[in-house]
Image (cartoon, rainbow, N blue to C red):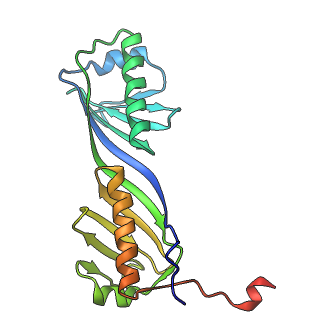
C-alpha cells in the first residue's frame, strides 16, 4: 500500500538536558540549609540535587556555579524552570550575581511515523546506518544535517537524540520520513480482517 502524502508524523520532546553557568561559586551547604526538597551528600556526590515539582525538572547544582538541568519538555519550560530556581535561591538569601547562561546539550524526543519501516532495506539503501537485529531490534541512523542520531524501529516508532534545538528534531523526523518514502522503505500498517470483528 502506498503511503499518503497528507500523513504527519507525531513528534514529542521527552527530555531536554542543559547546562546553566553562573559566573561565581555557590555555597551548597548554605543552599541546603535554606531550601527544602534538596539533597546534598558530598561524600556520595559532589553536587546538590534540587527537584522542582512544577515544572517537573531536576537540577544538579555544583559549587563551581554550574548546574545541569534535566526533565524539561520544551526550551520554554527549561527557561521557566531556571528562572524559578534562581528566584527561589535569591528569595532565601543565596547570593547570586549576573544572568545565568543556559546551553542546551541534548534534546531527546520520540516520534511515530504511523507506518511500518523495512529496516533491512533501509540499512542497504541509506548511508550512515547500522542494523544488527541480533544485538538490537532498531536501526541506528546517524544523520548529518541536522546532526542527530535516530533509533528507528520496524513499527515506525523512533527515538531522536543529539539535537540542540527543537526545530532540529522536527527537521530530522520530516527528512527521514521523506527519505524512507522515496526509497520505498515504508508501508502502511496491514490489518487482518478479524482484528476488526
Q: How far across and how far down the image is residue 148, in percent?
A: 28, 63
Query: Hey, which residue is sitting farthest right in the picture?
Result: 197
Q: How far across and how far down the image is residue 191, in percent?
A: 66, 87
* Viewport quadrant of the N terminus: bottom right
Above or below, comparing residue 36 to residue 140 in the picture: above
Q: How far across and how far down the image is residue 37, in percent?
A: 48, 26
* Viewport quadrant of the C terminus: bottom right
Count of residue discs: 0
Above or below, comparing residue 162 to residue 22 in the picture: below
> Is residue 95 or residue 197 the one in the foreground?
197
Q: How far across and how far down the image is residue 96, in percent?
A: 27, 15
In this rendering, position of residue 80 left or right of residue 22: right
Above or below, comparing residue 96 to residue 134 in the picture: above
Rendering quarter of residue 184: bottom left
Looking at the image, which residue is at 45% across and 32% down?
Answer: 51
Looking at the image, which residue is at 27% across and 79% down?
Answer: 129
Amino acid at each position: 500500500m502506498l503511503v499518503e502524502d497528507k500523513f504527519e508524523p507525531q513528534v514529542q520532546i521527552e527530555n531536554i538536558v542543559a547546562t546553566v553557568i553562573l559566573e561565581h561559586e555557590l555555597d551548597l551547604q548554605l543552599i541546603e540549609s535554606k531550601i527544602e526538597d534538596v539533597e546534598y551528600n558530598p561524600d556520595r556526590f559532589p553536587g546538590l540535587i534540587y527537584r522542582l515539582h512544577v515544572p517537573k525538572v531536576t537540577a544538579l547544582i555544583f559549587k563551581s556555579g554550574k548546574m545541569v538541568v534535566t526533565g524539561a519538555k520544551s526550551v520554554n519550560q527549561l527557561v521557566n524552570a531556571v528562572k524559578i530556581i534562581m528566584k527561589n535561591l535569591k528569595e532565601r538569601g543565596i547570593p547570586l550575581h549576573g544572568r545565568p547562561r543556559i546551553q542546551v546539550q541534548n534534546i531527546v524526543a520520540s516520534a511515530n511515523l504511523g507506518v511500518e519501516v523495512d529496516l533491512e532495506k533501509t540499512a542497504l539503501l541509506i548511508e550512515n546506518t547500522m542494523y544488527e537485529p541480533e544485538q538490537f531490534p532498531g536501526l541506528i541512523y546517524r544523520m548529518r544535517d541536522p546532526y542527530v542520531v535516530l533509533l528507528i524501529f520496524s513499527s515506525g516508532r523512533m527515538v531522536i537524540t543529539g539535537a540542540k534545538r527543537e526545530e532540529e528534531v522536527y527537521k530530522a523526523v520530516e527528512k527521514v520520513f521523506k527519505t524512507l518514502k522515496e526509497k520505498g522503505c515504508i508501508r502502511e500498517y496491514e490489518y487482518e480482517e478479524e482484528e476488526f470483528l
